[in-house]
Image (cartoon, rainbow, N blue to C red):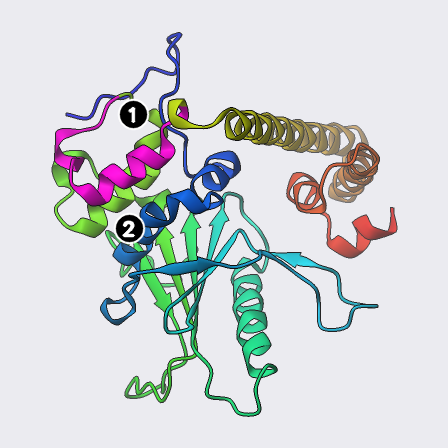
């Protein structure tokens, strides 16, 4: 049986939670964890794309038109020996058009390769999303007990694949609720580990294989250098602060809108009151230096409105 820490007890966290920004960066952002990163990806990638070595790539990219396009940043990016590019994104919160954003990220990485040469024979781009938020699949019944989804360019009727170009894979941890006794496949075991490692205080006997040991070693906080430990603690502090800001903003926005709606007795008043309060909250968060994605998630406003504040 897996030994979990009790959040209500005064226990010290042994392993990072990979599904937090700080934990994700501690694992994926450290080149010394290359073997652990490949162990994770090799369970999620198709058989013909298993990794034996990778080179880390810069995660910050400039838009095509420097004067117009802003920089965009991937959570993690690497390249294998064949030249194929692999992007890993952590998704923790509901976001409008998140799938289209993933497509945009993958397309940009693919396009950068085509502009380097004179032809279009370029390696594929894989984007792997670690989903700590539910995906709204149209066919919910089909996706019961299915946790890996893959999207790419195929012929509609017969699923012909004329070329390997852009592939988007999602590991859906938000819906993964299997117990350790129910984990039978290697995919089950990896998803269980990714979702629960932050709560473990010991290494389960059924996860002692070398593949999982690499991940435990990479995520053990006691093994961090002093600089890495300081950076990790800062990342976790910032994340807890952002979450608190988002929770507070959502609560205030909801309560304000509801109160004004009752006072005016009209749905229009409730909506307008909420929007005014959301704009006020967004302005304050922006002045405090909170990042744009956090503000959008906290208030529900569109990016154009926030940019004008």
Magenta stretch: includes residue 119:
no
Magenta region: which residues?
202-221
| Residue where numbered disc 2 is placed | 39
| Residue 177 in view of the camera | no
Using a 10 Å C-alpha cutoff, classify the residue at mark 2 as few (fewer than 14 neighbours), some (14 to 19) or many (20 or more): many
Label 1: element kind:
loop
Q: Position of residue 125 (x, y in %)?
A: 45, 71
Q: Residue at x 33, y 53 (%)?
A: 38
Place residue 176 in its image quadrant: top left
For marks 2 and 1, give the one nearer the viewer: 2
277 or 242: which is nearer to us? 242
Q: Which mark is residue 200?
A: 1
Q: Residue at x 58, y 68 (%)?
A: 104
Farthest residue, direction right: 309
Using a 10 Å C-alpha cutoff, classify the residue at mark 1 as few (fewer than 14 neighbours), some (14 to 19) or many (20 or more): many
Going from N to C along the chain, the mark reached first, 2 or 1, is: 2
Farthest residue, direction bottom: 119
Q: Residue at x 31, y 39 (%)?
A: 215
Dots 2, 1 in contact, CB < 8 A: no
Q: Residue at x 37, y 11 (%)?
A: 11
Label 2: element kind:
helix
* Quadrant housing the N terminus: top left
Q: Which mark is residue 13?
A: none
| Residue 51 in view of the camera | yes
- Looking at the picture, does residue 42 appear above or below residue 106? above
Q: Position of residue 213 (x, y in %)?
A: 23, 37
Q: Is residue 178 left or right of residue 150?
A: left
Q: Position of residue 179 (x, y in %)?
A: 19, 35
58 or 250: which is nearer to us? 58
Q: Is residue 33 left or right of residue 105?
A: left
Q: Main secondary structure of the magenta part?
A: helix
């Amino acid at each position: 049986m897996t030994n979990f820490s009790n959040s209500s007890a005064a226990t010290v966290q042994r392993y990072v939670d990979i599904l937090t920004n700080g934990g994700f960066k501690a694992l994926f952002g450290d080149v010394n964890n290359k073997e652990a990163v490949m162990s994770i990806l090799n369970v999620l990638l198709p058989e013909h794309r298993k990794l034996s070595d990778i080179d880390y790539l810069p995660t910050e990219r400039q838009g095509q038109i420097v004067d117009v396009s802003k920089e965009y940043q991937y959570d993690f990016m690497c390249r294998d020996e064949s030249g194929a590019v692999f992007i890993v994104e952590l998704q923790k919160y509901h976001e409008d058009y998140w799938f289209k954003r993933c497509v945009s990220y993958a397309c940009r990485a693919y396009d950068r390769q085509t502009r380097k040469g004179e032809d279009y024979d370029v390696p594929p781009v894989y984007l792997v999303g670690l989903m700590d938020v539910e995906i709204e699949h149209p066919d919910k019944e089909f996706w019961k007990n299915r946790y890996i989804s893959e999207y790419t360019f195929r012929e509609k009727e017969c699923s012909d694949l004329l070329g390997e170009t852009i592939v988007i894979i999602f590991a859906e941890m938000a819906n993964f609720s299997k117990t350790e006794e129910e984990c039978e496949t290697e995919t089950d075991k990896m998803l269980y580990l990714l979702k629960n490692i932050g709560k473990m205080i010991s290494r389960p006997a059924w996860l002692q294989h070398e593949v999982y040991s690499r991940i435990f070693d990479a995520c053990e906080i006691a093994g961090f250098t002093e600089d890495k430990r300081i950076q990790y603690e800062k990342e976790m502090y910032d994340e807890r602060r952002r979450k608190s800001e988002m929770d507070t903003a959502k609560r205030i926005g909801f309560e304000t809108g509801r109160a004004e709606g009752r006072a005016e007795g009209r749905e229009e008043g409730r909506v307008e009151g909420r929007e005014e309060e959301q704009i006020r909250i967004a302005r304050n968060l922006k002045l405090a230096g909170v990042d744009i994605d956090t503000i959008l998630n906290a208030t529900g406003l569109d990016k154009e409105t926030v940019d004008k504040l």
